[in-house]
Image (cartoon, grey):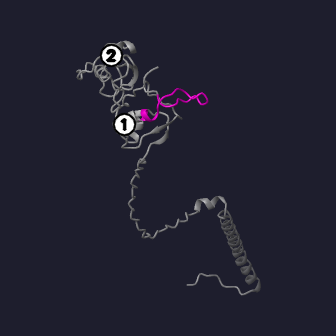
Amino acid sequence: MNNRPPISSSPSNSLNAYRKRKMRGGPNIVYIVAGVLVLGGVILLVVWLMGPSKPLNSLFATETPTPTLTFTPTNTSTPTETPTVTPTATITPTATFSSPFTYTVQDGDYLALIVEKYNLGDDGIALILLLNPYSGTAPETGMPIGIDPSTQNIIPGQVILLPNPGMQLPTPTPIPSDLPRGTKLNYTIQAGDTLAGIASKFNSTEEAIIKENSITDPNAIQVGQLLVIPVNLVTATPTRPPTSTPITPGAGTVLPTATFTPIN
């Protein structure tokens, strides 16, 4: 049994049916077009916001990995250390002289030091005094002429005569036996001298030597000290034993032998 109404085939009924279908489909097309436009706008907005220096760019930016540099090891050879050769100090030899030579006194010099410097031996000081007899001070320069044996002082700038190494002291001249009694001679004390020995050498007496030179302590006489000796006070006798020993200012100090010059 068919309950559907009979289909009318009239033109008016067909036109009405077409209009109804058209009205039902119109809104759907509008909605689709609007949705497409909205979606496109959203996409454009997102793309714009993700552009350079845009807010979303910092949110979605990924870190660019820093490339790792791999260094290829270089075969660097370690240089072999060359030993440093230490130069041997050159020893400057002291000049050797064959005859007496001049020397200018330097700061800090003294006779014993000069003797050691030039290797003048045990008689060095005695030879220096012998070669530089003292005769006062030069008025034009203020420099001493020679070396005073009583003080043995030398000053910087003074020019003195030094003996050559190996030079020997002259043999002392014997005291003339005919010298008048009490004749006074100058004598410079040498290493090993004693007042008794000096008195015996000059045929004098200790008492006379002490009195003549105002000696307060016979044991305090010094090497280089100048004495005035009254000679031929007594008859020559064998050498007396020493009773006093002179004080030597420095090790190895030796002074010249007696100079027998009568005092006027």
- Which residue is drawn at the image coordinates 41% and 52% (left, top)? 90
Three-letter amino acid code of the residue under disc 1: Pro
- Which residue is drawn at the image coordinates 69% and 76% (left, top)? 25
Q: In this view, does 161 lie above or below 75?
A: above
Relative horizontal placement of residue 25, taking residue 127 as reference (left or right):
right
Mark nearer the N terminus (1 vs 2): 1
Q: Quadrant of residue 249?
A: top left
**Could you tell me how far apart the alpha carbons at marks 1 and 2 are, in whole angstroms?**
26 Å
Kind of element beneath mark 1: loop
Q: Quadrant of residue 193?
A: top left
Residue situated in front as seen by the camera: 45 or 30: 45
Residue situated in front as seen by the camera: 29 or 171: 171
Q: Main secondary structure of the magenta part?
A: loop
Kind of element beneath mark 2: loop
Q: Give the range drawn in magenta.
A: 128-147
Three-letter amino acid code of the residue under disc 2: Leu
User: Residue 113: x percent and y percent?
Assistant: 40, 35
Q: In which quarter of the image is residue 237?
A: top left
Q: How crowded is mark 1: few (under 14 residues within 10 Å), some or many (20 or more)?
A: few
* Residue indicated by mark 1: 170
Residue 233: mark: 2
